[in-house]
Amino acid sequence: MKSAFLANMSHEVRTPLTTIIGFAEAIESEASALDLPDSCSLAKHARLIETGGKRLMNTLEGILNLSRLEAGQMGFSPEAIDLVAEAKEAADELRPKAREKDIHLRMQAENSTVWAEADDGGVQIVTRNLLSNAIKYTDDGGTVWIRVSQGAGHAIVEVEDNGIGMETETAETLFEPFRQASEGFDREYEGTGIGLAVTQKAVEQMNGTIEVEAEKQVGSRFVVRLPQPTTCPAPSPRRRSLTAS
């Protein structure tokens, strides 16, 4: 019943919200092209409407994804996928977000190819959520790493940052829905705290595990272990790395 309700609610909210965001973008574009006086804040107000609409849309998507994962309705289809390629795709997508904060986004891979038995859509949910969080909670000029390796029968993805970190007791509850490192009315960072709950559910449905190590004012490291396929091409020993800043 909850899943059906959220699916219907998502449709009913998404349709008008898409219209609001679209017209806000159009108003901002047209206002920016006009020779308006400096006192006119039309473009600024349109941009605020667009930003608020997109934030609400992201919240809606997070709640719906969490509900689908809890109900086993995401339709993951595990197959042999290249974690190096998946990690690079996620890093490329979030590179502009990192550059806005002058954050160095660095990728390291043990081999040119690392195979995992997983769903490519699920892996993208996991890597993008972890990278997005790392960028959000890292101060300007900091560094975020995404590493891909293999060991003990697992394919491994690590996302590490030198950001704000967290206390040990906070890390223990971090994967609960609607929990964040900073909470309450005076919290510093935006967001609902759904992303890591979604990430954990996605990892579990791909028969993997996720762990976090963190220290306040030092940084955080998330380690995802996914099963390897029983048969896969032999990985190349050549090291492949990418640095984006």
Image: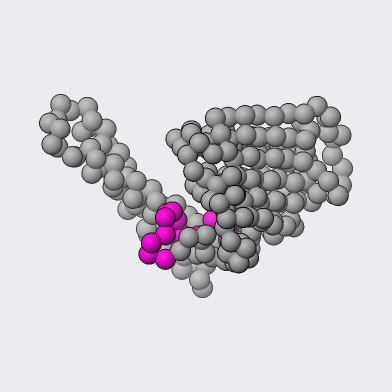
- Find residue 157 and report its horizontal and vertical position in percent: 70, 45
Determine the image quadrant of residue 67: bottom right
Q: Residue furthest bottom?
A: 1
Q: Nearer the viewer, residue 75 or 156?
A: 156
Q: Nearer the viewer, residue 112 or 212?
A: 212
Query: Which part of the image, by quadrant, shows the C terminus?
Result: top right
Residue shown at the point (84%, 29%) measured from the top left: 237
- Find residue 211 and report its horizontal and vertical position in percent: 69, 57
Q: Which secondary structure type mostly characterizes the magenta part of the structure? A: loop
Residue shown at the point (49%, 47%) measured from the top left: 136
Residue 51 seen from this side: yes
In the rendered image, residue 243 lying in the magenta stretch gets the answer: no
47 versus 69 height, above or below: above
- Find residue 78 and report its horizontal and vertical position in percent: 73, 50
Residue shown at the point (67%, 55%) measured from the top left: 213
150 versus 16 height, above or below: above
Determine the image quadrant of residue 114: top right
In the rendered image, residue 187 lying in the magenta stretch gets the answer: yes
206 versus 105 height, above or below: below
Q: Is residue 164 left or right of residue 243?
A: left
- Tell me the magenta residue range: 184-198
